[in-house]
Image (cartoon, rainbow, N blue to C red):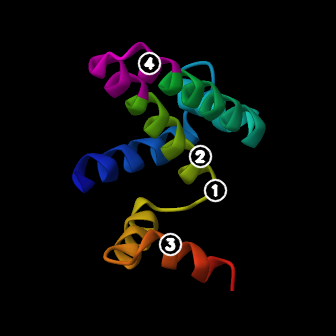
């Protein structure tokens, strides 16, 4: 799974130097954080709607869009996929309740 995320990360990084009129991702980068967050918000809402509709295929499609736009945000903020997977690894085996309590300390 990490392999496709790493490949996407590399492509998204390359898009930073592309012309905005030739690259959707570059156009998002040029518009900045608010536009990227707007897309993430839209995609999140679409995940919710797809889930309510009950079609797993639609859920998968919308989650892929959400992940994609989240990856755009990560690259925009210079956060690597590896940092996210490291955080998930750190949490693995840790009770969700305990992890949440640790955040509040």
Q: Residue furthest front?
A: 97
Q: Which residues are magenta?
A: 49-62
Q: Earlier in the sequence, mark 1 or mark 3?
A: 1
Local SS, label 2: helix
Disc 1 to disc 2, C-alpha distance: 6 Å
Q: Gap between marks 1 and 4, in whole Å?
A: 28 Å
Question: Which mark sits nearer the N-terminus, 3 or 4?
Answer: 4
Find disc 3 in the rendering and name its residue: 97
Front residue (pair 77, 97): 97
* Residue located at (69% from left, 38% from top): 37
Residue 78 placement, left or right of 80? right
Q: Nearer the viewer, mark 3 or mark 2?
A: 3
Residue at the bottom extreme of this rendering: 105
Closer mark to the observer between disc 3 and disc 4: 3
Q: Give the dominant element type of the magenta stretch: helix, strand or loop.
A: helix
x, y (%) of residue 40? 60, 34
Q: What residue is disc 4 on?
A: 50
Asked whether residue 23 is in view, the answer is no
Badge 4: how crowded within 10 Å, few (<14), some, or many (20+)? some
The residue carrying mark 2 is: 73
Is residue 3 in sight in this rendering? yes
Note whether 79 is above or below 5 in the view shown. Answer: below
Say which label, 3 or 2, has the lower sequence index.
Answer: 2
Q: CA distance from mark 2 to mark 4?
A: 23 Å
């Amino acid at each position: 799974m990490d392999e496709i995320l790493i490949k996407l990360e590399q492509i998204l990084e390359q898009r930073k130097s592309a012309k905005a009129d030739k690259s959707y991702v570059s156009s998002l980068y040029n518009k900045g954080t608010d536009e990227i967050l707007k897309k993430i918000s839209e995609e999140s809402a679409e995940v919710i709607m797809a889930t309510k509709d009950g079609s797993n295929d639609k859920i998968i499609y919308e989650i892929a869009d959400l992940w994609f736009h989240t990856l755009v945000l990560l690259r925009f903020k210079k956060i690597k996929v590896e940092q996210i997977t490291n955080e998930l690894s750190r949490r693995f085996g840790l009770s969700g309740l305990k992890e949440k309590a640790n955040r509040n300390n």
